[in-house]
Amino acid sequence: MTERDLRKLEASIRLKMEDIKNQKVSLKDSGIGGLMNMLKKADEAAYEKLMPHYKQMVAKYNIFK
């Protein structure tokens, strides 16, 4: 995976997180979990940087259970 692909993946994850916060899509329907796993395999440092934000978002915005 190239550096450009990693940046696009990270941007996609951040965009999905914003959509979840704005209740445009549910956590389950967003597919963000698969993207996070893909990021973990490709770039562990970027994954570790995003994970606290992801956990905080899940705790606050998981209203679609």
Image (cartoon, helix red, strand yellow):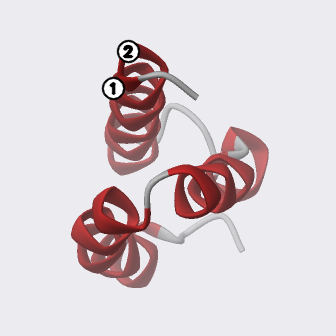
Q: Secondary structure at mark 1?
A: helix
* Left or right for 56, reference 40: left
Query: Looking at the rendering, which quadrant does residue 33 occupy?
Result: bottom right
Residue visible at 74% across and 53% down in the picture: 34
Residue 31 locus on image (x, y percent): 73, 45
Q: Nearer the viewer, residue 21 or 46?
A: 46
Residue 57 locus on image (x, y percent): 34, 69
Please, what is the three-letter code of the amino acid marked with disc 1? Answer: Arg
Mark 2 neighbour class, 10 Å CA radius: few under 14, some 14 to 19, many 20 or more = few
Q: Nearer the viewer, residue 25 or 12?
A: 12
Residue 64 locus on image (x, y percent): 65, 64
Please, what is the three-letter code of the amino acid marked with disc 2? Answer: Arg
* Left or right for 63, reference 13: right
Residue beneath disc 2? 4
Q: How many marks?
A: 2
Q: Secondary structure at mark 2?
A: helix
Cβ atoms at labels 1 and 2 below 8 Å apart: yes
Residue 51 locus on image (x, y percent): 35, 74
Quadrant of the rendering where the C terminus is positioned: bottom right
Q: Residue furthest front?
A: 2
Q: Is residue 3 above or below residue 17?
A: above
Query: Looking at the rendering, which quadrant does residue 29 occupy?
Result: top right
Q: Is residue 37 above or below residue 34?
A: below
Residue visible at 40% across and 84% down in the picture: 59
Residue beneath disc 1? 7
Mark pair 1, 2: CA separation: 5 Å
Q: Is residue 5 above or below residue 34?
A: above
Residue visible at 58% across and 29% down in the picture: 1
Q: Nearer the viewer, residue 35 or 40?
A: 40
Q: Is residue 19 above or below residue 21?
A: above
